[in-house]
Amino acid sequence: MKTEVQKISSCRVKVTVEAGAEKIDPIIKGVRSAFTAQAKIPGFRPGKAPWSHVEKLYSKGIQEEINQRVTRALIDKAYEEVKNIATLVNVENFNVAQGQGASVVVTIDTVPEFEMPDTAKWQVKKMNFEVTDEEIEERMGGLRQMAASFEEATADDVATENDLIAISFTSDLDKEALSDTAKHYAADEEYWVQLREDAFIPELSKALLGKKIGEPVAHTATYADDFRVTDLAGKTVNYTVTIKTMRKQKPATDEAMLTRFGVKDMEALRADLVKNIKSSKQYGEESRATKELCEAIENSVSFDLPERVVEERIYDELSMDPAKPLETFKGDAEELRKSDIYKAAEDRAIRTLRRTYVLLRLAKEREITLSQERVEEAIDRLAQATHLAKKELIRRLSNNGRLSEFLDRELCSVMLEKLLEECAVL
């Protein structure tokens, strides 16, 4: 076979492949023989029908099979001529004829070539999992509130933080003009609320602190522009609020805490707190350090990327966007490309791909590979997340051509974990 490789850009080549009849005719003969052997034609035993009858009945299927097999052979030859293939872009100008051979033009995107950055410059703040006494006491205070009880207030008691109260209120809102959800904010004869920052109406908690049962309070509330109830967003509302019933929060005793959380003593509860805080800090610190390292890698390189791979990654970014831009701009690809949301997705795709190529090359240079155990763990996680059986998940990844991408992503995670240990500084 004859090949000619033409470099189109830094990450794209076109390969013209030509094969003579001596290479192609055996493929054509093999297809015809297979159809003849399997053809079921009335009046003839299997495999004994004349070729003219077989060709007449199955001409379309025969030609499709010939085209498929010959194209595959020519593409395989093109692949032999190109190093570091990223993805197949296009197959065009295909021709095949018995006695004349075949030809095709194959466009291939290649893995980018780049100079490896200095890994010593990738520095991230060292992770700290230490749990302080202040953190333990703060968390313990939260648990005491969770286990707290309430007792009826007296006429002389005043409202304090975290008290549970029933209020009646009126407002200057036109209740009839509001949605059913917004009507609950206009007036009520008895509404229970706990006095804390998120107490139903904006700033209501502050307005009621220090007030007694039966004491009317004038309160002006301004709802945020992005308030969850659209009818009230951005509005200023005048209220008259009265505390009808009040229950004072009674801090939980140690005995109540132990009963509430099912532990044998306060030391055991404290030990559980330390463990939970440390686990939470570890997750947060690892996320923070990994993000810093990824940004350091991305900022240390700038090189061209294979166009088709970038396009596919941008599509992935857009398909995962909660704003659903692919639906919004459906049928208008040009406007989508002009939008800010597309430009943001393109930036994320480019940064992610550059980081991926750097990590994969670094793993190759250091001879770091995925263990079978790590592969199994990764597949288990994705199977749980997608609610698919492992075999079905692998089948879908293979059929979609995403299995190697999935494994590359996991290998990048392994490489990042090793780099985090190397790049951590005080």
Image (cartoon, grey):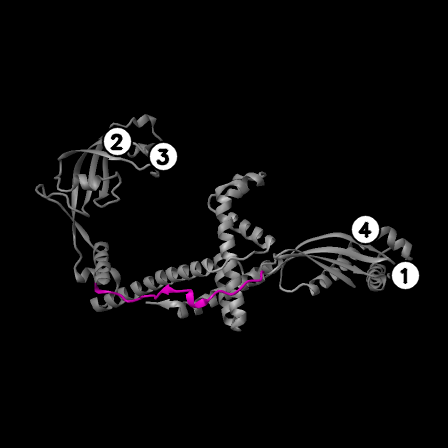
Q: CA distance from mark 2 to mark 4?
A: 75 Å
4 or 1: mark nearer the eye:
4
**Mark number displayed over residue 48:** 1
Say which amino acid is labelled 4: Lys
Tell me residue 266's x, y (percent).
20, 66
* Quadrant placement of the C terminus: bottom left
Which range is magenta?
A: 112-133
The mark that comes first in sequence, 4 or 1, is 1
Quadrant of the snapshot with the N terminus: bottom right
- Is 132 in front, or is 349? 349
Position of 328 relative to 316 (above/below) = above
Figure quadrant of residue 65: bottom right
Whole-angstrom CA distance, mark 3 to mark 4, is 61 Å
Q: Secondary structure at mark 2?
A: strand
Question: Residue 95 or 257: which is nearer the viewer?
Answer: 95
The percent coordinates of residue 286 (x first, y second) are 38, 63
| Numbered disc 4: secondary structure | helix
Name the magenta segment's main secondary structure: loop
Please provide percent x and percent y for residue 264: 23, 68
In this view of the protein, which residue sits in the foreground, 19 or 67? 19
Residue 226 is inside the magenta segment: no
Residue 383 visible in the picture: no
Q: Which mark is residue 60?
A: 4
Q: Earlier in the sequence, mark 3 or mark 2?
A: 3
Which residue is rendered at x = 71% and y = 56% of the image? 106
Q: Is residue 331 left or right of residue 352?
A: right
* Quadrant of the image occupied by residue 231: top left
Q: Which residue is mark 3?
A: 230
The circle on residue 90 is none
190 left or right of 347 in image: left
